Amino acid sequence: MTSRRSDFLSLRNVARDFTRETRSYRAIDNLSLDVEEGEFVAIVGPSGCGKSTLLRILQGLIPPTSGEVFYKDRPQDGVNSDMAMVFQGFALLPWLSVRDNVALGLVARGRKPSEIDRTVSFYIDKVGLEGYEEAYPRELSGGMKQRVGLARALAIEPRILLMDEPFSNLDALTSVTLRDEVLMLWQDPEMPVRTIIMVTHIIEEAIQMADRVVVLSRRPTHVVREIAVDLPRPRSRKHPEFERLSDEIFSLIS
Amino acid sequence: MEGEPEPYTGISRIIGLLKILKEKGGASDLYQLGVDLHLELGEELQIVKAAESLGFVITPESDIALTPLGEEILEKDINGRKKLIRERLLTLPLFSRVFEWLEAEEEESLSMEPLKRKIGEAFPNEDVDTAFSMLVNWGRYAELFGYNAAREELYVDRGV
């Protein structure tokens, strides 16, 4: 845990306290984590261990109580506009069409209409949403809703994509397909986003997708172990190393 | 959990099924597959039937196996999959007939109610509401049909 600090993204001795009904408790304690550009990192841990809080600290949505976040070798101050988030519950606006939902982040950033149009069309095509542009969220299955969430995050062309349990609101078969598609997008040379940090509670999902799995402890959360996954993709759950990694992570969490 | 309350099976679930089958070596016992996926028999059969109708699996006896086409779609990227589904949809009588009907219209579109009536007449064995949901959802995925919910109109997707 005392390794060299990454000059891309680094959390150093981060702690975060919360107050509930006048009582203060420590959610995250002495957590250090480094992410290199181009990595796919999965963060796993027991439920309620503060995984989502960690993502929000990374993005700069909430500040750490102590410790520091470094981005591109400088202390991060405020919201990091090079990051975009994909949410578990999709977070779509029901009164907007697919196209307008995807455009949201670009509109908020004050981009020109012609640029918004071009960029939105590109990402709608990339995630496979062409044909759904004028549909509204209520007309979509869960899988299609999450593709909208993904396109919206990608459309602002972040350098780092944060994903907070992105498949856990989907049925098992749909999530198999979406994991596959996210990996395709990550490996697509036309995609500017090279770095993905995904929080999940599904061990198998972490091993299937990530280059490295970061295992967190119960609260107050810190990093228990970092495990490199060297298996070639597509990864088979039947591979003995897959099973070994699964067992290792499971024993650390349970 | 965002399931699929609709009576049809979404394409993402079909592709998920094909991927699981591929991991199992391309074939499985139907019953065992349902147990592994925690699917009720009725739900499993609905997904399997949908995959079979598109030519991606065969179900000899009580088994299920990927066809060469089922293997092929897994090798494709996101848009390659959509293109292949489009080709497959046009081999289905329901989709090809509706495509012809729409093409024959001046605006290449039909309102939901008259379209449902035509489907009921031409395909008396189909449940028209399920058929219509499938036309909208599979049609949109494959960029074959578009649907305007405000006007309740199905139209030929010309990609404009």
Image: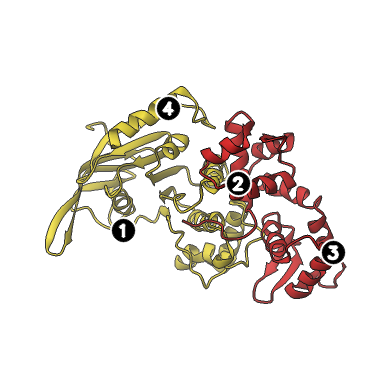
According to the image, label 3 marks what residue?
Answer: B122
Q: Residues within 10 Å of mark 4 (few under 14, many from 20)?
A: some
CA distance separating discs 2 and 1: 42 Å
Q: Earlier in the sequence, mark 3 or mark 2?
A: 2
Q: Which label lies toward us, 2 or 1?
A: 2
Q: Which quadrant of the figure has residue B151?
A: bottom right
x and y percent of residue A242 in the render?
A: 44, 28
Mark yes or no: residue A174 visible: yes
For label 1, the residue is A61
Q: Residue at x 44, y 50 (%)?
A: A168
Neighbour tally class for label 2: few under 14, some 14-19, many 20 plus, Cα within 10 Å: some
Question: Which chain shows up in red?
Answer: B
Q: Which residue is most to the bottom?
A: B151
Farthest residue in the top direction? A240
Real-space CA distance between mark 3 and mark 1, rounded to the nearest whole angstrom: 57 Å
For residue A165, the mark is none
Identify the mark nearer the N-term, 4 or 1: 1
Query: Dot 2 corresponds to which residue?
Result: B44
Alpha carbon distance from label 4 to label 1: 36 Å
Q: Is residue A230 visible?
A: no
**Closer to us: B1 or A104:** B1
* Type of amino acid at the residue the image marks with label 4: Glu
The kind of residue on which mark 2 rests is Glu
Same chain letter for marks 3 and 4: no
Q: Which mark is residue A243?
A: 4
The image quadrant where one finds the N terminus of chain A is top left
**Can you tell which quarter of the image residue A45 is in?**
top left
Residue A20's spot in the image, x, y percent?
A: 17, 61
